[in-house]
Image (cartoon, rainbow, N blue to C red):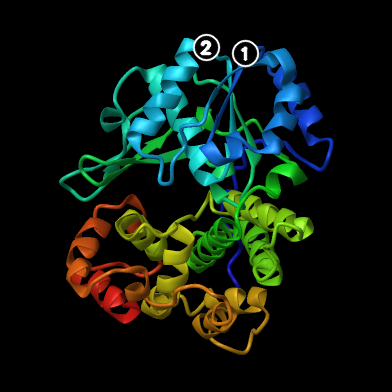
Amino acid sequence: MNASLSFQHLAADLRLHCGEDSLAALVKELKRNGCRRAVVVSGRSVSVSPAMDLLRAALGPLLVGESPSVRPNSPVPAVEEAARVLREQEADAVIAVGGGSAAVSARAAAVLLAEQRPAQELCTRRLPSGQFESPRLDAPKLPQFVVPTTPSTAFVKAGSAVHDEATGQRLALFDPKTRARALFLHPAFLRTAPHGLVQGAALNTLSTAVEALESPRCDPISEAMLMHALRLVARHIGRVEPDDIAAREYLVLAAVLCGRGTEQAGGGLASVLAHAIGHRAHASNGIVNAIVLPHTMRFNEPATIATSGRISEALGSAQTSAAEVLERLLAPLPIPHRLREIGLAQLDLDAIANAAMSDFFISRSARRVQGVSDVRGILDAAW
């Protein structure tokens, strides 16, 4: 007889509005939260799009400023610039418009504004014991709202990983008070993102869901969300053109499901390597994930015998190994499939392996990473 279940599934509030009337819903949500001075944080391209004019018209006097400072990987200077605008405009709400970098930059800017200390003093640190420690960020934070343009799992998260350009380090800021109050999926904004950005973000959702499903910490409720996220990505990853709005909407919904499903068991080796490689190769996390994920899955196989079947099932072929099913799904996509194809040299691999060992998510690998040599072996296989 099987043992009885024993788990906790703790879920944060989620308010999501999808459709042509979602910007009107944004105004209602701002007022519901007592907000009267909203600042938009976005990238430059979306800030000059016709979609942004729709948002400005919908917000009217509730919009008091804009910071089009968002850059890929959320570098610290860009986040500091957004925090400066929030301070000068006396904002009482932040509206992130864009992809994952916009959501992360908006959250991190709210943290810097409230805590009044540099990101380097507020981030999670690895202790000499190998454990990770996150400082308590007690100051109240501005309410966050998100208008997505790409399918990012970051929209429903409480962590904000920014990039220290001076040291090359990834600084992780964690504060549940920065979790978005509501999301607004509007067709005009979903049309603004280039094909490559949408595809890269969807691939990141795919990888994140796979890694969470590999985890022994994945509970049955998370499993349901993650498996459906994989189904949606597998069904729509080849249909990301701007005129296929339904596909883009489903990919964003997949990212939301994945983001929610990874609250209990998120991150893993592919995520670690994407963090270590992305800014070096100037490639999106999704592209790096797509390259390394089959190899991290094979590394994990001794520890995922009991869990990999659900990945194969969600991807549509329960009779084949999960890594093989994934490779068949990725093969037709016009993306790089080897690390050398994104400009990495073999000489880069030692530095990447060492950087990976300092990443918080390395401790969440389904199979324990014994040392740098394990990571280097995966990188060699993916190169």
Labels 1 and 2 touching (C-beta < 8 A): yes
Disc 1 to disc 2, how far (Cα)? 8 Å
Image coords of residue 58 (percent x, y): 77, 24
Q: Is residue 326 above or below residue 81?
A: below
Say what secondary structure mark 1 lies in.
Answer: loop
The answer to whether 251 appears left or right of 358 in the picture is right
In the figure, 376 relative to 79: above or below? below
Q: Which mark is residue 48?
A: none
Which numbered circle lies on residue 89?
2
Tell me if residue 158 can be seen. Answer: no
- Which one is earlier in the sequence, the residue at label 1 or at label 2? 1
**Viewer-closest of 171 and 298:** 171
Quadrant in the picture for the N terminus: bottom right
- Provide the residue designation for mark 1: 37
Location of residue 342 by image quarter:
bottom left
Residue 336, percent from left and from top? 45, 74
